[in-house]
Image: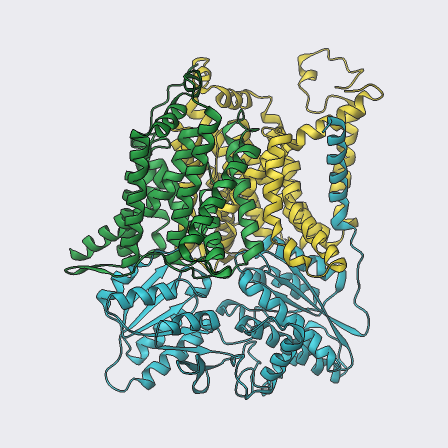
Chain colours: A green, B yellow, C cyan
């Protein structure tokens, strides 16, 4: 029994970082309607820039972290301008492929610059484990979850109470009305991209600190897609809840069925849920017009 | 549009190659293609065989995603199903002319199952449901060792016709291109039947299509099944060509490769599929050539240029999407029109 | 851009692309040279090893040429990047076979070896090798053209088990297997488990993980309950071994860590040694820092001159250098006996190498007649010298 509890707890805690990546995706989808398949690569690039700052240029880890955040925000602005504006009218497949193309470019650049080796970036958080009777929670898992929880809490508060956050929500739900009410829609969408890239960078640095930094980091994002669909593509709350659930499912599957089932099991669960709720648990039902 | 062609019956209007010129060009092209083993180098033949396999798979994906609008990222896994089916049937002494269609039908059946979510979900939700199917299938490839050989993979007995073994590129070339020709013809023909029209109706507005009498369930499942059938055949031919395969071949990146091929080539047309598959297969080859050639002039640039393959791939995709959204087929169409209407402008 | 210019550019690119790959000047092998072709994964998921593999074979050919070549003939190395993709690797094979008529070909993966096997045999003039130590390619009967420059993975694990049995003085230690779900990870495990069972060594946990991006916490939880004395890693190059060790430490476990050669390169032993882990492993080659072998010294000397920025000789480098040595020896034996470099002659020459001196790359005189080199040695991490030092003699399996 304590084994089950331990796996469950570990899973839910590691779901926190997945929630960060899911948040990064959902922000963009909600704000601009774009499906961003490049979340994994954004995460990876953020982690690599942090590593470059902290190790290659030997800056203090905090400073390197901030620089990585700034660089990715700038990249997000550039991408939004150059790639996504021209494609705003096109079919879903086209925009999907554009983000896949972006992911390829980022992946290629990272591989060209840093090669395929694995690096160990310095950690920002303490590592002391926590003992709860028979259950042991490693420090990294707890630390990552704490950071993720704080950040997500901050975002939820931002969206609820800050004027800018409300403006972003307004732009997301109806850009035309938001524009007539005087909200600068372009600036709002740009801000959405910036926020999304910031969240992605944080997630990337957290994962890299515990799992090592290599171009394969981007594939850690695949389980996030399961969480996103489970929660509903345009629901922030859904993304968070679903990530915790997916984290739980993954850890329990890894514990009882073996680590190689980690990729498959969340997707099986998602398929099952889609039958009952085709827009995810919390996604908005769209009404199609004839 | 060619001048001087006057259709007097509906049937002649619907012909696939309406003018004598078009027919002549087609014959010439086929003649050149099917005599390639005589005049081509080994390298060219090997590339041609790989291109042929990719063309078949791309035509299949274009039917599902280009014509019927159902985004499928499970295509790579379908190839795997075809390949492993052919391997298993071959080990049980089933001749290739039974094994290959059987593999196609098996994959089609699986395609129907994978396509079931399309009855409930749409768009990106469907895409990710197909990713789920892909992961499940690749998991089966790796774990079902008795049939697929597991992680080390399996060997595939070569196709043989009454003792004539299809060993080597020259013979496999005919096998592959024979299948490719008939499958391409079938797909081209599909567009002028009611099934093809139903696909397009479903893509554009499926509720309206249903009101007009298109059976949504049958059409969507048929779209998946047909796409999977093509992928199964392509996978089987892949097995016969390589003789040996591991599950590492059928990754999600393969599905993305085919998706890129149909976008670059042009959604919804057979010509687009062919051009897209050609293009995607050649990009790494051309890049390697450029890297090698330039490393003779600037040594050390190879290590910078080679990882650029992915960057170039990404730039090409985005470039096509932004500047040429209807793909290479549209470019081809424009070039043809220039020739047909010369000296007039298009 | 006007639509006319855009069209012209696209047409131009199309024409160039269609002509390009077919207009290679063919560089047919000259009479007095031996061509060594290679399809190396210099980019892609295996690039950390691919660059080293490419350098190893390239440098061996250059070094051998500087020593007079093989029977006066120079070795010409032709290599291209396969990106670890099977389509490209096979295309490279066909291209180089058509244009350069090589006598030897080095490939990037087990997939590749199996895919080109029939074509290689049919051509009748090429021998292949690769860094893969998989059981399925060390097969003189079905793969007469292929040679594996080392023992197969199961044999490496058998060496490990024998060492554990011999060196545990008191009770039988509990062993845990942690490996990746790839061929590199899985191939050796059944052999290791079988030998452990024969020796009565209990395996208390068998953990399979994905290749990368792994969250190790649930696995460490499992290990904590199994309480192993020895943890054997297989299939990882660096990550996630350090994270495993760190988390095991935090969970109160301090087992001995064991592994096999590819996973015991400098980045791995540096990281694990820095954590204070007790590290032992089996390697089929001498390490690049050892000084008692003439060939290793030659490698170091060549690298110091030609690639001074390379500080560490990775086992992938040594492996491809050794493959080059095998190729050169096979060619040498054929040419000395005045035989042409056909597959039949080269196979016979290979199988005659029963007591071949590798110059210390592998200990003991190598017996390559079974198309592999079944020799290995245990190494332990020495915290003072911060390197891996020999912990046993060379064992033949």
Where residue C240 sits: x, y (%)? 39, 62
Taking the image as shown, residue C193 lies to the left or right of residue B236, namely: left
Figure label count: 0
Which corner quadrant holds the C terminus of chain C?
Answer: bottom left
Taking the image as shown, residue C64 lies to the left or right of residue C207, namely: right
Query: Quick one: C209 or C307, which is closer to the camera?
Result: C307
User: In the displayed structure, would residue C62 be above or below residue B146?
Assistant: below
Query: Quick one: B123 or C128, which is closer to the camera?
Result: B123
Which corner quadrant holds the N terminus of chain C?
Answer: top right
Where residue B249 sits: x, y (%)? 52, 52
Taking the image as shown, residue A203 lies to the left or right of residue A255, namely: right
Where residue B336 sits: x, y (%)? 76, 27
> Residue shown at 31%/80% (left/top)?
C199
Where residue B229 sits: x, y (%)? 51, 37
Query: Quick one: C38 or A82, which is closer to the camera?
Result: A82
Q: Can the viewer see residue B295? A: yes
User: In the displayed structure, would residue C153 be above or below residue A274?
Assistant: below
Q: Residue furthest top?
A: B8
Q: Can the viewer see residue B158? A: no
User: In the displayed structure, would residue C327 be above or below residue B274?
Assistant: below
Taking the image as shown, residue C239 lies to the left or right of residue B288, namely: left
> Residue shown at 43%/15% (left/top)?
A180
């Amino acid at each position: 029994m304590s084994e089950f509890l331990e796996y469950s707890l570990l899973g839910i805690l590691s779901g926190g970082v997945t929630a960060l990546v899911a948040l990064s995706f959902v922000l963009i989808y909600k704000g601009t309607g774009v499906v961003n398949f490049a979340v994994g690569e954004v995460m990876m690039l953020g982690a690599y820039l942090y590593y470059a700052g902290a190790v290659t240029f030997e800056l203090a880890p905090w400073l390197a972290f901030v620089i990585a955040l700034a660089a990715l925000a700038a990249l997000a602005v550039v991408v939004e301008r150059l790639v996504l504006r021209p494609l705003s009218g096109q079919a879903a497949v086209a925009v999907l492929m554009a983000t896949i193309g972006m992911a390829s470019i980022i992946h290629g650049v990272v591989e060209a610059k840093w090669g395929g080796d694995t690096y160990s970036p310095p950690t920002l958080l303490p590592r002391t484990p926590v003992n709860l009777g028979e259950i042991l929670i490693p420090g990294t898992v707890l630390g990552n979850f704490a950071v993720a929880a704080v950040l997500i809490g901050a975002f939820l508060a931002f969206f609820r109470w800050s004027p800018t956050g409300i403006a972003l929500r307004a732009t997301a739900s109806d850009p035309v009305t938001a524009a007539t009410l005087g909200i600068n829609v372009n600036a709002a969408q740009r801000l959405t991209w910036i926020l999304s890239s910031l969240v992605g960078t944080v997630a990337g640095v957290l994962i890299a600190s515990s799992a090592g930094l290599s171009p394969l980091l981007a594939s850690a994002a695949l389980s996030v897609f399961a969480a996103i669909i489970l929660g509903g593509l345009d629901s922030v709350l859904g993304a968070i809840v679903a990530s915790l659930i997916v984290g739980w499912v993954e850890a329990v599957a890894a514990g009882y069925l073996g680590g190689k089932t980690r990729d498959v099991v969340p997707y099986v669960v998602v398929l099952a849920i889609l039958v009952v709720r085709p827009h995810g648990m919390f996604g908005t039902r769209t009404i199609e017009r004839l | 549009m060619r001048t001087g062609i006057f259709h007097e019956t509906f049937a002649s209007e619907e012909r696939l190659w309406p003018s004598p010129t078009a027919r002549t060009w087609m014959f010439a092209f086929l003649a050149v293609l099917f005599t390639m083993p005589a005049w081509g180098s080994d390298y060219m033949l090997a590339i041609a065989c790989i291109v042929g396999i990719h063309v078949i798979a791309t035509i299949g994906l274009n039917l599902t995603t280009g014509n019927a609008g159902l985004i499928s990222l499970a295509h790579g896994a379908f190839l795997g199903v075809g390949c492993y089916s052919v391997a298993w049937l071959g080990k049980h002494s089933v001749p290739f002319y039974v094994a290959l269609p059987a593999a196609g039908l098996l994959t089609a059946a699986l395609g129907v199952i994978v396509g079931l979510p399309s009855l409930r979900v749409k768009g990106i939700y469907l895409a990710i449901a197909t990713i789920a199917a892909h992961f499940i299938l690749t998991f089966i490839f790796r774990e079902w060792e008795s049939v697929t050989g597991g992680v080390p993979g399996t060997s595939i007995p070569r196709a043989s016709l009454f003792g004539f073994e299809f060993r080597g590129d020259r013979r496999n070339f005919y096998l592959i291109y024979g299948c490719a020709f008939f499958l391409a013809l079938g797909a081209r023909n599909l567009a002028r039947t009611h099934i093809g029209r139903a696909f397009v109706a479903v893509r554009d507005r499926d509720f309206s299509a249903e009101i007009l009498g298109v059976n949504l369930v049958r059409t969507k499942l048929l779209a998946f099944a047909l796409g999977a059938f093509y992928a199964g055949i392509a996978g089987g031919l892949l097995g016969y060509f390589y003789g040996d395969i591991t599950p590492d071949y059928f990754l999600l990146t393969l599905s993305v490769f085919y998706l890129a091929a149909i976008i670059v080539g042009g959604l919804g047309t057979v010509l687009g599929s062919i051009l897209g598959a050609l293009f995607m297969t050649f990009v790494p080859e051309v890049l390697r050539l450029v890297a090698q050639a330039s490393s003779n002039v600037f040594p050390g640039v190879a290590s910078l240029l080679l990882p650029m393959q992915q960057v170039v791939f990404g730039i090409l995709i985005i470039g096509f999407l932004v500047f040429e959204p209807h793909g290479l087929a549209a470019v081809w169409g424009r070039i043809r029109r220039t020739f047909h209407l010369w000296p007039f402008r298009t | 851009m006007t639509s006319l210019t855009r069209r012209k550019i696209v047409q131009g690119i199309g024409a160039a692309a269609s002509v390009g790959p077919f207009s290679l000047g063919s560089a047919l092998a000259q009479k007095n040279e031996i061509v060594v072709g290679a399809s190396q994964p210099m980019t892609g998921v295996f690039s950390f090893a691919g660059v080293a593999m490419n350098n190893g074979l390239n440098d061996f050919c250059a070094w051998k040429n500087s020593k007079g070549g093989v029977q006066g003939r120079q070795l010409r190395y032709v290599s291209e990047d396969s990106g670890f993709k099977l389509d490209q690797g096979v295309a490279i094979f066909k291209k180089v076979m058509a244009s350069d008529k090589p006598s030897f070909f080095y490939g990037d993966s087990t997939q590749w070896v199996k895919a080109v096997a029939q074509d290689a045999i049919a051509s009748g003039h090429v021998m292949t090798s690769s860094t893969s130590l998989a059981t399925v390619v060390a097969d003189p009967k079905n793969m007469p053209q292929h040679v594996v420059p080392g023992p197969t993975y199961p044999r490496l694990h058998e060496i490990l088990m024998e060492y554990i049995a011999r060196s545990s003085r008191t009770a039988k230690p509990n062993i845990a297997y942690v490996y990746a779900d790839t061929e590199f990870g899985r191939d050796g495990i059944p052999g290791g488990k079988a030998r452990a069972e024969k020796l009565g060594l209990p395996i208390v946990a068998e953990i399979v993980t994905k290749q990368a991006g792994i969250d190790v916490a649930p696995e460490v939880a499992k290990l904590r309950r199994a309480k192993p004395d020895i943890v054997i890693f297989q299939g990882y190059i660096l990550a996630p071994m350090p994270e495993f060790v760190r988390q095991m430490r935090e969970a109160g476990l301090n087992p001995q860590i064991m592994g096999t050669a590819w996973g015991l390169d400098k980045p791995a032993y540096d990281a694990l040694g820095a954590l204070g882990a007790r590290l032992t492993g089996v390697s089929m080659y001498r390490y690049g820092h050892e000084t008692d072998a003439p060939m290793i010294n030659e490698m170091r000397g060549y690298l110091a001159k030609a690639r001074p920025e390379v500080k560490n000789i990775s086992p992938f480098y040594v492996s491809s250098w050794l493959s080059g040595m095998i190729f050169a020896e096979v060619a040498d034996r054929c040419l000395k006996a005045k035989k042409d470099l056909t597959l039949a002659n080269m196979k016979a020459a290979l199988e005659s190498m029963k007591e071949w001196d590798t110059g210390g790359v592998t200990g003991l005189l190598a017996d390559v007649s079974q198309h592999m080199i079944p020799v290995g040695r245990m190494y332990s991490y020495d915290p003072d010298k911060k390197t891996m030092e020999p912990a046993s003699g060379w064992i033949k399996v």
